[in-house]
Amino acid sequence: MRVEGDIPQVTGATSLVAYRVVQEALTNAHKHGAEHRAHVVLTVDDVALTIVVTNPMAAQGEASIVPGSRLGLAGMRERVATVRGSLETGPSPGGWRVTAWLPLTQEGAA
């Protein structure tokens, strides 16, 4: 895990959503990824917290692939939406990537 920026400025609902996004992304990496490992980067700037979780994927047919309900991804999307953030998930070179952008303030969000 790597943290860039001033993590203590992430508070309130954004902090809770960030925790749950990382938790779900790591759960998915453990269930569906190769080698049960992941790389987490948290980047805080003046506007937002960006979370990037990547993990290698198991090859088709390997025992480490566990069927999922995909409710974890839907839950992440719903949580991120509560703080007016955005979420992108999907394949990346050599694996899977979850990227969440969570604004630090609700300014401009009506």
Image (tube, grey):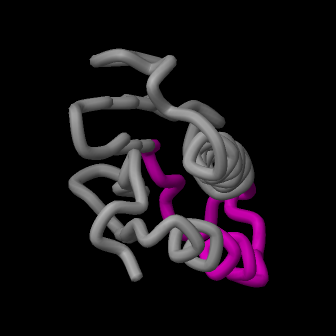
Q: Is residue 79 visible?
A: yes
Q: Nearer the viewer, residue 66 or 4?
A: 4
Indicate left or right for 55 with 73 as reference: left
- Estimate the x, y position of residue 40 in percent, counting from the top left: 45, 31
| Residue at 22% from the left image edge and 54% from the top image edge | 93
Residue 71 sits inside the magenta stretch: yes
Indicate left or right for 27 with 76 as reference: right
- Estimate the x, y position of residue 16 in percent, counting from the top left: 69, 45
Question: Is 86 situated above or below 42?
Answer: below
Residues in magenta, as a range: 54-76
Q: Nearer the viewer, residue 35 or 21?
A: 21
Residue 78's image quarter?
bottom right
Residue 63's image quarter?
bottom right
Q: Nearer the viewer, residue 56 or 97?
A: 97
| Residue at 37% from the left image edge and 54% from the top image edge | 103
Residue 24 sits inside the magenta stretch: no
Decide whether the magenta segment is chiefly helix, strand or loop.
loop
- Estimate the x, y position of residue 82 in percent, counting from the top left: 59, 73
Indicate left or right for 58 with 36 as reference: left
- Estimate the x, y position of residue 73 in percent, counting from the top left: 61, 74
